[in-house]
Amino acid sequence: MATDAPSVPHPRRVLRHHWLVRLTHWLNAAAIIVLLMTGLNIFGAHPRLYWGDAGSVDERERLWLETGASPPWSAPKGWLEIAGTRFDTTGLIGVSQSPKGTTSFVAFPHWATLPSGRDLATARTWHFFFAWVIILNGLAWLLYGLLSGRLWREILPKRRQLTRAHLWNDIVEHAKLNFPKGEAALSYEVLQRFAYAGVTLVLIPTVILTGLAMSPGMDAAWPWLDALWGGRQSARSVHFIAMSGIAGFLLLHLVLVVLSGPIRQIGAMITGRMTIGGDK
């Protein structure tokens, strides 16, 4: 006698993301992209990073990161030097091709910066404007997360998720590209929570505070901001490191969205609703 096949839950549409979560998500995405690209343009005005309060090309002991180009100028070599170790980065960092097809001696290529050419004044204006966008947007996101309980419910890791077995299982599942299905897709797993909490509660506040510490006006009003990081040049270095962390998260986030089903994931972040059930 044949047995009945196990029933498959009928697909159903459920609310996954509140409208305010979706709005702040897309505003954050736009602001971060503009801030990253204008920040690279600003960095190009002085492509060196130091530790301490002051920095110049003569203070080599405080210098830890630098980009540049080396001769022969008929075929220049771009390079990136970190803590005394130099890497060949020709075509990407130090030396790249301009929109007109000529050799350009800039820290980052034109397609990675806003504006695409050297324009410190415009880059700084856009950077400051979108910095306020991300500050106000972040405050709205945080306030909603606190009042609605979403911060504890979906962003911060739960105690049961912090066991060694649970952490290892989530690492293995991500490595195998086994993404949650059905009801499990309606909440974040522990690695996602660590990533989102790290970006929203650590990295973004860090770039905001270090950005303020680099402002002479803010230094005059709040001297402790500069001292908090050990000097303006240290604040600039931490700002760059935190920005790199956000860029890395953004890249990884996009890759995982593509691998886990871009139409479903992006659709949920646009409409707020996700289809679950019917998974074999």
Image (cartoon, helix red, strand yellow):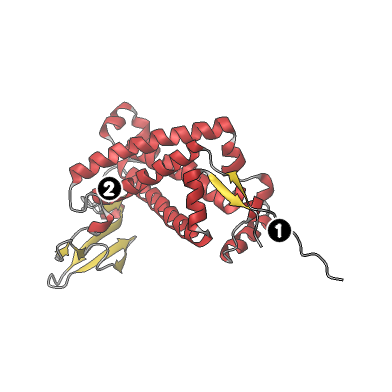
- Residue 225 picture location, percent across and down: 37, 34
Q: Which residue is painted at 18% across and 47% down in the image?
A: 119
Viewer-closest of 7 and 195: 7
Residue 51 appears in the rendering:
no
Viewer-closest of 45 and 56: 45
Q: Is residue 140 left or right of residue 94?
A: right
Q: Is residue 29 left or right of residue 273?
A: left
- Residue 64 picture location, percent across and down: 32, 56
Q: CA distance from mark 2 to mark 1?
A: 50 Å
Q: Is residue 239 left or right of residue 274?
A: left
Q: Which residue is painted at 17% across and 70% down in the image?
A: 76
Looking at this view, name the residue that lies furthest to the left. Answer: 74
Q: Where does label 2 land, which residue?
A: 38
- The 10 Å Cα crowd at callout 2, few under 14, some 14 to 19, many 20 or more, is many
Viewer-closest of 24 and 226: 24
- The quadrant of the image that shows the C terminus is bottom right
Residue 123 falls in image quadrant: top left
Q: Which residue is painted at 18% across and 53% down in the image?
A: 117
Q: Amino acid at mark 1?
A: Val
Q: Earlier in the sequence, mark 2 or mark 1?
A: 1
Q: Amino acid at mark 2?
A: Thr
- Residue 218 picture location, percent across and down: 30, 31
Q: Where does label 1 land, which residue?
A: 8
For residue 103, the mark is: none
Q: Which residue is painted at 51% across and 59% down in the image?
A: 261
| On screen, residue 132 above or below 83 | above
| On screen, residue 136 above or below 99 | above
**Element assignment for label 1:** loop
